Amino acid sequence: MSRERPLEFSRAPMLALFLALQIAGAATAQTVDFEPDTSGCLPDGSTAVDDLAITNQFQSLGIVFGVDNNLDLVPDTGISPFLEARGSDGTDAFAGGCGVSSHDTERTDRPQSLGSFFLRTRAGVGTSDSLLITYATPFSHRASGELWDIDGIPSSSEEWMITAFGAGGSRLASPIVSPLGTSTTCENALESGAWPWVVDVDPSGQPIAYIRIDYLGAGTTLLALDNFHPAGEEPCALFRHLVGYWPFDEEACATGCNRTDVARSHFSTVTTSSLVPGIKGGAAEFDGVDDGVEVEAHPALDFTARGMTIFAWLYGDWTSGTGYGPLVGKDLPGKGGYRVGIDAAGILYAYLDDGTSCFTVTASSAIPAAAWTQVAFVFDCVAPQSVDVSLYANGVPVGGQTISLGVVGNTSPLTIGYDQASRFEGVLDDVAVFDSPFTDATVAQAYGESFAWCAKCLQSPFTLDLAYNSFSTGEEGWTVLTSNGFVPLVWNGDSIQREDKASGGTSFVAPWPFLGDLRQAHGISFDWCADMIGKKRGVSVTLYQGGSVKWIAANLAVTDDYENQWLTFDFPFTNAASWLTSNGTFTVRASDARIFDILSNVTRIRITGESMIGIGETVKLDNVHLYYCPDLDVPTREPEIGGFAVRTPDLELHKEALFKP
C-alpha cells in the first residue's frame, strides 16, 4: 500500500525560550524514562499522575516534548502529549496481548523495561499526532529510545518514521522507519513489546536540535515512547571493537546452505535451525541434536591480549530438561581456545584453554528459566599470565574469577550453538563478539541495546547494511508497479512475488529507508527467482531522482538455465555495474559524478525482471540489502579538480545460485 510521507518541513528556528535556556552537559545526558522520583515528582516538581499533559516538565533536563502536526518544528499551540500510567485505566496507549490481560503492559517473555509511566500522544482525535522532541541546547549527535507495541489491527497497520533535524530545520540524516505492524498475533515480536531505535548523525556536522516521530501507517493510533536517551557515547566510542555480529533476523538454511545474511559480519555455514520470534526481530532455535552455526576462522575472533567480550540473548527452560549447552566458542581440545555456555542447572560458565592449562568459571546462581536473558562474558588480560573472567546476566555481574592463563588462539572456526562434544537446545538472538574487555559499567550500558546500529563499527572487512528487508513478517512496505500502475503483490511467508503479464516486466518498488540520501551506500543486492529466467531475460535496478527527471539503471542478463532457482544479484554503485544514465538515450554510461548525484536524493528504487508480452512469469524477491563497506570512504566532492573522488569497492557484479529450503 502506498503511503504519503511527511517530508516537507519549514526551516523553523529554535524557539527563543529554548535558546535562552542553558543546560549543563551532564544534565542533558540523563535518560528520560518518565518515572517520578521517590517522592512521586517529575523533574519540575509536579506530581506524576496518569493522563498528565506534558509541556515543560522535563525542561530542566534540556528536553521539551510537544506535538507538531503541521510539520514546522514548532510545538502546536494547545496540543500536548500525555504521561501514561502502566496498565489499563480507561485511556490506553496500546492493547495487551500475548498473555497480557492488562493494556499498557509488556509481555512477560520480553525485557521488563516499560516502568510505571511512559509518554503517549492523544487518543480519539481522528489522526495520529507527530511527536516533537526539542533540545534546549543542541549538543548530541546520537539519541535513542523505545517505541512500544508496533503492530496491526484489522483497520490499521502501524509504522513510524523518526527524523533528526539541526537548529535551522535541516534534516541531519535519512529518516529511520519502524517495522510495519501487520498482525496482532504473538508471532509478531513487537506485540506488547518495544522497538528500540537509534538516531545516529554525522559527528562532524550539526548536533541534533529536534527529533520528530511521524506516523506512516494506515488508520489512526497512539504513539507510546519510553526510555528516551537524549545523548550517550558515540557508538564507535563504546562499541568500536565489535568484530562479529549475528542477529539471526533471516530464515535459517537447509543443510549445507551458505548464507552471508545469517551472519552479517563473517561467512557462516548453518546446519539446521529454525527462525522464531526473538528479542529483536528473528532468532535462531537450536534443537540440541544437529543444529549449529559454523563461522569461518578469523584472527579477529581469537582471544588475544586485548581481551574479549561476548554477548547473546538466551531463552531456554532447563527446569524441564531442555535449553542448555554451549553457546559460543572457538576451541579445539588441547590446542587452546574459549567456550561459553549454560549448564543443565541454568548456570552460566566460561571455559578457557591455552593449550597447557584449562579453567572453567561459573556463575554464582542460575538465570531465570523460560525467559529472555541477555548474557555477557568478559575476558580481561590484566597481566601476561593472568585473566579476569566476568559473567553477567541482564547487565548485572553474576560471577567471576581471576585465573592464571596465557593468551589463547587457534585456527578453528567459531561455533554458535555447539562444540566438539555437545549441542545447545534453546533459542539465541543478537550474538555479538568484541575484541576488547567491557567494564561493569559498559556491560550495563549495553544491556538492552541493539548491536545492529553499531555494526558499522565492525573491524572486520565485510559489508554491512544501511537498509535490509527479509520479508519474514510481511511485505515490509514494498509495492509492485506494472504498466497498469501499482497492483497488489503476494507475500508467501518468506519472500514477495508477482505474476508478470506486462510488457517491460514487473517492478518491485522499495520503501523507506531505501530512499533519500544514499551516498554512504556502496551497492544493492537481493535474491531473485523466476520461472522463466532460463529464457535469458535479465534483472535490472533503476534509481530515480524526482520521478523520471534523473535516473540511472544497471542491467544484468541471465544466460544460464536457472528456472525456479534463487539467484543473488549484486549491483555496486560504481562503474563496475555499468550504470546507464537518462541523458537522452539508454546507452550512455553514467559517470561517477552522475551516480553520486543521483544517490544524494533517491526518490524511487525499482527492481525489475524482464518478460515476454502476454506470457505469465512469476517472479520472487527476497533479502534486499542496501549495503556499505566500513573500510571504504564515502564519495567526496573534490572542488580543486572539478569532480568527484570515489573509492571503488573491491566488489564485482556477480550472480550465484542460492538454494532456499
Image (cartoon, rainbow, N blue to C red):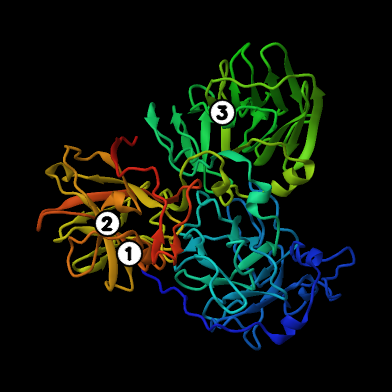
Q: Earlier in the sequence, mark 1 or mark 2?
A: 2
Determine whether 157 is above or below 491 in the image. Answer: below
Task: Indicate which disc residue 579 carries.
Answer: 2
Residue 128 placement (x, y as % from top left): 54, 76
Disc 1 crowd rating (10 Å Cα; few below 14, some 14-19, many 20+) is: some
Q: Residue at x 75, y 61 (%)?
A: 31
Q: Which mark is residue 594?
A: 1
Q: Secondary structure at mark 2?
A: loop
* Residue at position x 50%, y 62% in the image: 177
- Of the two numbered discs 1 and 2 in the rendering, the one whose residue sits closer to the viewer: 1
Report which residue position mark 3 lands on: 299
- The answer to whether any part of residue 657 appears in the image is yes
- From the top left corner, tell me how far across and down residue 636 is, in percent: 46, 60
Distance of label 1 from label 2 (alpha carbons): 10 Å
Return the residue nearer the eye: 621 or 435.
Answer: 435
Q: Give the CA distance from mark 3 to mark 1.
A: 39 Å
Q: Give the number of the mark in front: 3 or 1.
A: 1
What's the residue type where badge 3 is placed?
Pro
First along the sequence among labels 3 and 1:
3
Using the image, determine if residue 71 lies above or below residue 611.
below
